[in-house]
Image (cartoon, rainbow, N blue to C red):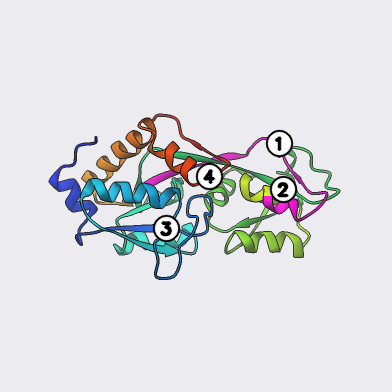
Amino acid sequence: MTELSPSAKAELTPTGELRVALNLSNFLLISSFPSGGTPTGIVPDLAHELGRRLGVPVKFTGYESPGKVADAAKTGVWDVAFLGAEPARASEIDFTAAYLEIEATYLVPPGSPIKSLEEVDRDGVRISVSGRSAYDLYLARTLKHAQLLRVEGIEASWQQFLSQKLDALAGLRPRLVTDAAKLPGSRILDGRFTAIQQAIGTPKGRPQAAAYLRAFAEEAKSAGLVAGAIERNAVRGVTVAAKA
């Protein structure tokens, strides 16, 4: 088990409890969060294990999007967050290596001439995307020609794709499978434009906390904690990340 120093515990639990930020838009990692109740899913399972090792209660706070989780980092209202480790967030958050990966790709509408991932990044192609998601941040860095149309949330990006008759919908493959079933003739493109690196983060300025979390993430992978959480919650479309 990862050794816990007094300084690491103090940085991780400055209020005497482990305050965990949840990105509620990621349905793969947070299955439910009933009002006044306890959240369920892969992330809550790992957070409870972390709290057990620290010997403190866990307090969960839900956020509508990963962007709002990242925005709150500088305010000191949470101690640990589970979200995509994107460079745009690294100025405020120290991340571990990935503990889990989720494929991101595109859905195209019926009759679309687009056959491959490479064909999406062309002049005139309009892509619906959940704003400030990890895959939006990735596409913003890498696309050269296509246009990203951002809205708040995964469901809103799906509705925008439909209502504006856009050329592609960017998203996590498991969600796109669900969307494709609702739009006969639509297609999910083969391959992936990226794999979202889900990691554990703590606000900048907590070096001992960051070091402990890095070790915890590696142990969670090697000891089967991540795999066990995936199986226990019956989640499909995610994989345990490779050793750092």
Residue picked out by circle 2: 107
Number of numbered markers: 4
Q: Earlier in the sequence, mark 2 or mark 4?
A: 2
**The C terminus appears in which quarter of the rendering?**
top left
Mark 3 vs mark 2, foreground winner is 3
**Do the residues under discs 1 and 2 have CB atoms within 8 angstroms?**
no
CA gap, disc 2 and disc 4: 24 Å
* Magenta segment includes 184: yes
151 versus 12 height, above or below: below
CA gap, disc 3 and disc 2: 26 Å
**Which region shows up in magenta?**
178-200
Q: Amino acid at mark 1?
A: Asp
Residue picked out by circle 3: 22
**Do the residues under discs 4 and 1 have CB atoms within 8 angstroms?**
no
Q: Earlier in the sequence, mark 4 or mark 1?
A: 1
Secondary structure under the numbered disc 4 in the rendered image: loop
Q: Is residue 163 left or right of residue 40?
A: right
> Residue 190 shows which numbered tag?
1
Mark 3 vs mark 1, foreground winner is 3
